[in-house]
Image: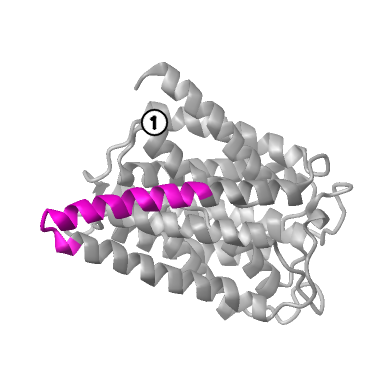
Amino acid sequence: MIAPVIAFASLLAIGIGFAVGLLGSGGSILTTPLLVYVVGFDAKSAITASLLVVAVTSAFGLISHARAGRVIWRTGLLFGGAGMVGAFAGGQIGQHLPGALLLAAFSVMMALTAVAMIRGRRRIAADGPHAGLPIARILLDGLVVGFVTGLVGAGGGFLVVPALALLGGLAMPNAVATSLLVVSMKSVAGFLGYVLEFGDGSLVRISPMTDIDWLATVTITVGAACGAVLGSRLIGRVHPNRLRIVFGWFVLVMAVFILSQQIGSTVIDFASGSVLNLVEVLGAVVAIVVFFTWIIRRPVQEQIADYDEPEIAFESPTSGERPSQD
């Protein structure tokens, strides 16, 4: 790998980590495109490496939030534990899917992430801290979101934050902080799902389907982790509502670019007689649009009163928080 390319990618990774630390979601969705179009990874290697980058970045972003007491550990560990199971399963399945199919699915998820960021979050009515905590539903949502994370290599923070607010009764600052714990846990599981395979009997080994440039991956991970620490420390100094909207539009443009690339390649395959590839990719796009539209719209129907994003801009380390639960 050429050193200038790695250096440039690391600078971009700092920006990605900054968004993760500040917003609790969104930045990780750009890790895979960075690895594919800047560093030159193939689709599966990029998805695998991005899961590692996201896991480490979220963990570093979590540190400042944890010190400020914003993380609700019990809810996060419940959601994250279920997410790890789903993410590992998603990674195992993703090993055997075509790279074009995974990138098409990823681009659709990017687009829906962008729409969710542009629309903004909503305020959730809660009866009190963890009132009537629906453990079964938290576990189910954790499994579903974790599976998507492991399959396409995205952190899924834009799904985790509203789920924590709705199901766990968390205030938005706590939901943002706790989401970093959840994203880190399930990204680790998704990464292991891609790099490990089960051989004869109970033998576990490194999957030959995944070929990662570890130097580039570690360098980008370090850059993203530094950005995450910076972003989490600048909460209250940067207007997150404006950053979220600008970032959302950027993600949307990237999603359109990636999807157009994949559709263009499938059209070429179709012209060459590969009908199956075209059906696979277009079918996956339709299925994922329907699935994520349902996930995004479902909580909106249960919400009341628009949520104004500047609430996330903490005036002090304790504003809007609930006591941390060990």
Which quadrant of the figure has residue 2? top left
| Residue 177 in sight in this render | yes
Q: Main secondary structure of the magenta part?
A: helix
- Magenta-highlighted residues: 253-276
Q: Is residue 36 magenta?
A: no
Q: Is residue 258 magenta?
A: yes
Depth check: give the residue in front, 42 or 278.
Answer: 278
Q: Give percent across and percent down for residue 66.
A: 73, 48
Which quadrant of the figure has residue 37? top left
Callout 1 secondary element: helix
Q: Give percent across and percent down for residue 19.
A: 64, 43
Which quadrant of the figure has residue 122? bottom right
Amino acid carrying mark 1 in the image: Val
- In which quadrant will I find the C terminus? bottom right
| Residue 23 in sight in this render | no
User: Going 72% across and 41% down the picture, which residue do you hit?
Assistant: 232
Color encoding of the figure: one colour
Q: Is residue 174 above or below residue 257?
A: below
Q: Is residue 177 above or below residue 77?
A: above
User: Going 32% across and 45% down the picture, which residue do you hit?
Assistant: 43
Per the image, the residue denoted by label 1 is: 39
